[in-house]
Every structure is written in C-alpha cells, then in structure tokens.
Image: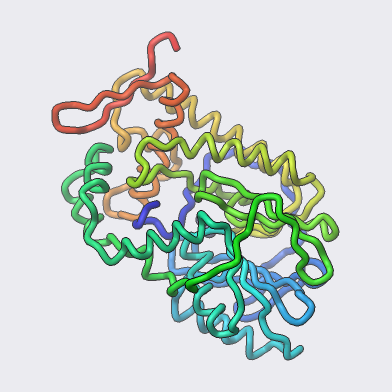
Amino acid sequence: MDQTAPAPTLPETPLRPVLDYPFETPPQRGQTLEVAPGVLWIRMPLPYALDHINLWAIDDGQGWAIVDTGARTDEGVATWRALFSQSTDGRSLTRVFVTHMHPDHVGLAGWLTRKFDVALWMTRLEYLSCRVVVSDCSREAPPDAIGFYRRAGWSDGALQAYRARFGNFGKHIHALPDSYRRLRDGEQLHIGRHLWRVVVGSGHSPEHASLYCPDLKLLISGDQVLPRISSNVSVHPMEPDADPMADWLASLDKVRREVPDDVLVLPAHGECFRGLHARIDALASGQQRANERLLAALVEPRRAVDVFGALFSRPISESSPALLGMATGESLACLNHLMHAGLVERSIDAEGIAWYRAVAGA
Ligand SMILES: [Zn+2]
Ligand SMILES: [Zn+2]
C-alpha cells in the first residue's frame, strides 16, 4: 500500500462506451438525492485532485446504514453535521459499511461509529491492511520503500519528497474502531427490507467490497467500477513482485458474471450510470491496449519512470509527488503483469536500477 497516494485514480485513455446517466446533477453539499426507494446519494468534498466522493445512505428500518464515509477533514465533518441537522425523520445511523481502506472511503468511519455507537462492517483484509498502514505512518520511510522507488528510477529529489510526505496516508483517517464486523465475499445481508450481496474484488485494494441488491437492481460499486476514470492499480513497496493487474482483470470478469447488466451502478466517483457490462468491457479493453503500447515501447530497455508516456495521457512530473507515486505504482503493475506473462524481462544494473525490455519473439 502506498502511503503517498490518497486519491487513487489516474485519467484513462479514451474509448468511452455510451453509458446512461439518469441523474442530471449530483446532490448539493449537505443535501441528499434519492436514487432508488430508500437509497440516498450523498456527495462529499475531497481535498485531492479527485475532488469528491459519493456516499450512500440505505434505509435500514430503525435508521440509516451508511456506505463509505469521506476523508477525515474539517470539510468532511462539516458536511456530515449539515446532513444530520437537516435530517427530519429523527432516525439515527444503524451501521457503517466501508468498501475499502483508502482514506476517501474509510476516513471518517471511526468518527461516525463512535459518534453513533454503531459497528463498522468491512472485509478483513481491508480492515487489517488499513490498521497496518496507518500504524506505519508514525515511522520514517523504510529503506525497502526507498529502494523500491530508487529501482524504479526516481531521482534523489523525488526520494527526498517521498521521505517528507511519508505518513500522509494516515492523516485523513480517523482512528478505526478496535473491533469490526467482517464482510465476506458472497455473503447476503438484509439492509432494511432488502437483501444485498457482497461482491469482493481485488487489484485496486486487497479485498474491496461492492454491494449488489437484486430487488432494487442496484450495485454500489465503490472504486471497483467507475465511469469516466479508471481505478488506480498499483504495485506497492510492501509487495514489490505482486501482480495486482491480474487480480484486477479477474475481478472485473467476476463482477460481470455475478451482477447483471440492468443494474443502476452507484460508483464512488462520478455519476450514477447504467451500462455496467459495457463499462467493464471498455475498462478491460483499455488495459489491453495499454499493455500493447507498453510492449511496443519496450523494444528498447526502459525504466518504470520511462514508460509513463506509453500509459498515461497526461504528463507526470516530479513536481507532483502524489501523481508520481500513483503513476510509478501503476506502471509497475503493468510491467509486473507482462513479466508474469513471460512477455517482458527485467535486469538490474550496477546502480540498482531496474530496466525492462520485451522478450524477443514472445
Ligand atoms: Zn480506492
Ligand atoms: Zn475512491
């Protein structure tokens, strides 16, 4: 997990399927918009390049179940307070679901669960990984991480900026509760009058939970399937040889198999849309084309930092350390994936820098 990258998305390369966006505008700050019977859309500001997140409130009988919470910022807390003050039905929160460990999703979970004395519902790997990364934040940047980014081709200046920023991940996360209710893949749970099924995916984060409701034909997709942008898939210093891209592509296939095309998708970023299968197909084929551009660029040996132009449409510069961290993680995810497939080989030079090239004839 990358302590430098709280807003984990990068602009995607084109090819947009025609998606249907049934709601013209998102809800105003501090307001809700009902998107299905008993399901409210909440929009929360974020202090990142990706400037908002969508949260959901589901009628849970005695009160409201919340899905995702926003980053821990003064604005986030103020937005929740505005929502509570405008609530007219007098009902409180019943529980807090969190799709995954990133600060924009989990940041205020500890605050909400304590304030309302309710349980946090999360998958085990997301809960535990979040606690590990947050506790790491009090340390100095470890030598393994410095070596990881040096091997990718970062300059001394970029490494220095990384050291200075190390620990930022935890700043936007309120202390998690010390216990939680585990969510499992395939589990069915009643939220209010309806049954919802947990659909776990991996690649963007370790054990991301989406929530699918067949009755209401809704999929709360978290960061698993987004319109307009693709989710960041990164290799992190903790597991440098990982192949999260394989997990990511398999997870897209799984969602396509398990969730029908006629749902209204409620994504964490962007607008609600219809066209789930077309969007998944576009994301998978977009990645396929990125891999092809990357292979073409690797006719000559290149470092991870040399392949940004082949993968991303916007320039990546050292002057934006968060973007540099995400782009490096994602480039390594693509490079590792091609290495695992036997299409790319890596050699480490005398300076400890990794160079990648396409395997001739593969
Ligand atoms: Zn995320
Ligand atoms: Zn997100």
- Judge whether 356 appears above or below 42 on screen: above
Q: Point out residue 334 in the picture as x, y percentages from the top left corner.
A: 44, 34
Question: 38 or 307: nearer the eye?
Answer: 38
Q: Is residue 173 left or right of residue 40?
A: left
Task: Count all numbered tags in the image, as a single digit.
Answer: 0
The reply to whether residue 7 is in sight is yes
Q: How is the image coloured?
A: rainbow
**Residue located 76% across and 82% down the image:** 62
Quarter holding residue 257: top right
Q: Is residue 331 left or right of residue 206?
A: left
- Judge whether 54 appears above or below 63 on screen: above
**Residue located 59% across and 86% down the image:** 82
Q: Is residue 67 left or right of residue 47?
A: right
- Judge whether 242 appears above or below 98 on screen: above
Q: Point out residue 80 in the picture as x, y percentages from the top left corner.
A: 57, 81
Which quarter of the figure is the C terminus placed in? top left
Q: Point out residue 139 in the picture as x, y percentages from the top left corner.
A: 25, 63
- Judge whether 181 appears above or below 344 on screen: below
**Residue located 65% across and 74% down the image:** 95
The reply to whether residue 315 is in sight is no
Q: Is residue 231 left or right of residue 62?
A: left
Quarter holding residue 48: bottom left
Question: 248 or 324: nearer the eye?
Answer: 248
Which residue is outermost to the left?
350
Q: Point out residue 225 in the picture as x, y percentages from the top left corner.
A: 63, 49
Quarter holding residue 248: top right
